[in-house]
Amino acid sequence: MYKEIKTIGVLTSGGDAPGMNAAVRAVVRTALSKGIKVIGIQRGYNGLLNGEVREMDLRSVSEIIHRGGTVLYTARCLEFVTAEGQKKGAEKCKELGIDAMVVIGGDGSFKGARALANLGIPCIGIPGTIDNDIACSEYTIGYDTAMNTAVEMIDKLRDTTQSHDRCSVVEVMGRNAGYIALNVGIATGALAILIPERPYDLDHDIISRMNQTQKTGKKHFIVIVAEGVGHAQELANEIQARTGIDSRATVLGHVQRGGSPTLRDRVTASQMGYHAVNLLEKGIYNRVVAVSADKIVDYDINVALSMHKTIDTMMLDVANTISI
Ligand SMILES: Nc1ncnc2c1ncn2[C@@H]1O[C@H](COP(=O)(O)OP(=O)(O)O)[C@@H](O)[C@H]1O
Ligand SMILES: O=P(O)(O)OC[C@H]1O[C@](O)(COP(=O)(O)O)[C@@H](O)[C@@H]1O
Ligand SMILES: [Mg+2]
């Protein structure tokens, strides 16, 4: 049933991602251009439950398109995972006069949005996570910036790794997904890339590859380990024990979440924010905005949350063939 949207609530939730600000800006400015009021909710679902809100005007989103992090702040809210927390959230929306919500975050945040939708609050999800682990979308806001940051850091590591004839085992983020690891591994010429989606064999995938390439004159090595595989330090110890090559572990960590968003993240975030508000204006609710074949599309939130994403095995073949 069509319900005219007069006021939209917008929040960022879960881990911050570069480009979230550009998405907030796009939501605010698109809504205002249509005469829709926007309420910014701070610190994700925590702020909704606590009423931590402020009205957003055109200038409230000035000077943020180039800034990492999120001006709305973000949080992980345990209370919102409970039925009581969700009911309280829906009641808060009504109390604050919020007709619809735009939730910028990852898969966890969309489960929260689905709960609100089931309680009668129209919702739109915008994928904002460095992990690129939203099944319905080929791309998530922050992914490009995070990968470029990781590449920049690993290029620096390469200098010292090469100078000392060492092996660097580098752990990159991604939670249970290996997308960051796979791309960053190819971009940095890593000898081995370990991702949670593909079991690995230490002898076959690392030790014998190192031994073989040593015979061709290679003296330094980069091994990329996805966070979902982990154990970078143990792996470095094992490699050193087995090959005699001095090895060091580096966990890149939260540096990957920061920094000024790349062009791709700014543009995608702007398109997604614009699309989200257009859907609401047309009376289309409970959707997740996504990228498919380079186009901005949207999926029913239940369908989106039931989808699965796979790893492009050709990428593994590329890495195995040329990073040698
Ligand atoms: N099953 C769920 N039901 C309702 N809300 C959820 C659920 N899972 C997560 N959330 C909410 O979304 C927040 C962010 O989820 P999280 O998985 O930490 O990050 P992301 O959204 O970036 O994947 C959580 O802190 C919680 O408030
Ligand atoms: O910042 P925290 O709470 O330590 O969480 C770390 C996690 O957040 C991420 O950086 C981003 O994940 P989300 O977007 O799902 O929040 C993951 O790569 C990592 O596993
Ligand atoms: Mg997530």
Image (spheres, rainbow, N blue to C red):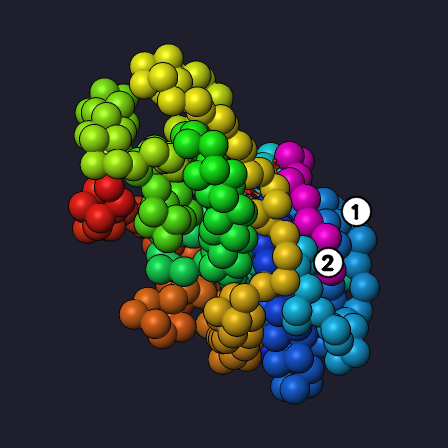
Q: Main secondary structure of the magenta part?
A: loop
Which of the numbered marks, if any, corresponds to residue 50? Answer: 1
Q: Secondary structure at mark 2?
A: loop
Q: Confirm or deny contact between disc 2 and disc 1 (CB under 8 A).
A: no
Instruction: Give me the residue at 62% from left, 69% from top.
Output: 22
Q: Secondary structure at mark 1?
A: helix
Instruction: Give me the residue at 49% from left, 26% from top.
Output: 248
Q: CA distance from mark 2 to mark 1?
A: 14 Å
Q: Looking at the image, which is closer to me, 55 or 94?
A: 55
The stretch of residues the image draws in magenta is 71-79
Point out residue 217 in the picture as x, y percentages from the top left corner. 26, 36
User: Does residue 73 belong to the magenta stretch?
Assistant: yes
Point out residue 94 in the picture as x, y percentages from the top left corner. 71, 59
Q: Looking at the image, which is closer to me, 58 or 265?
A: 265
Instruction: Give me the residue at 49% from left, 44% from top.
Output: 159
Point out residue 219 in the picture as x, y percentages from the top left corner. 34, 33
- Mark 1, Cα crowd under 10 Å, few <14 / some 14-19 / many 20+, is some
Q: Amino acid at mark 2?
A: Leu
On screen, residue 53 versus residue 208, left or right, reads: right
Q: Is residue 12 visible?
A: no
Q: Looking at the image, which is closer to me, 288 or 296?
A: 296
Q: Is residue 254 visible?
A: yes
Eyeballing the image, is 43 above or below 7?
above
Indicate which label's residue lies in the foreground, 2 or 1: 2
Q: Looking at the image, which is closer to me, 81 or 229?
A: 229
Eyeballing the image, is 295 above or below 224?
below
Among numbered discs 2 and 1, the one appearing first in the sequence = 1
Residue that badge 2 annotates: 72
Point out residue 324 in the picture as x, y percentages from the top left corner. 24, 41
Label total for image: 2
Eyeballing the image, is 200 above or below 126?
above
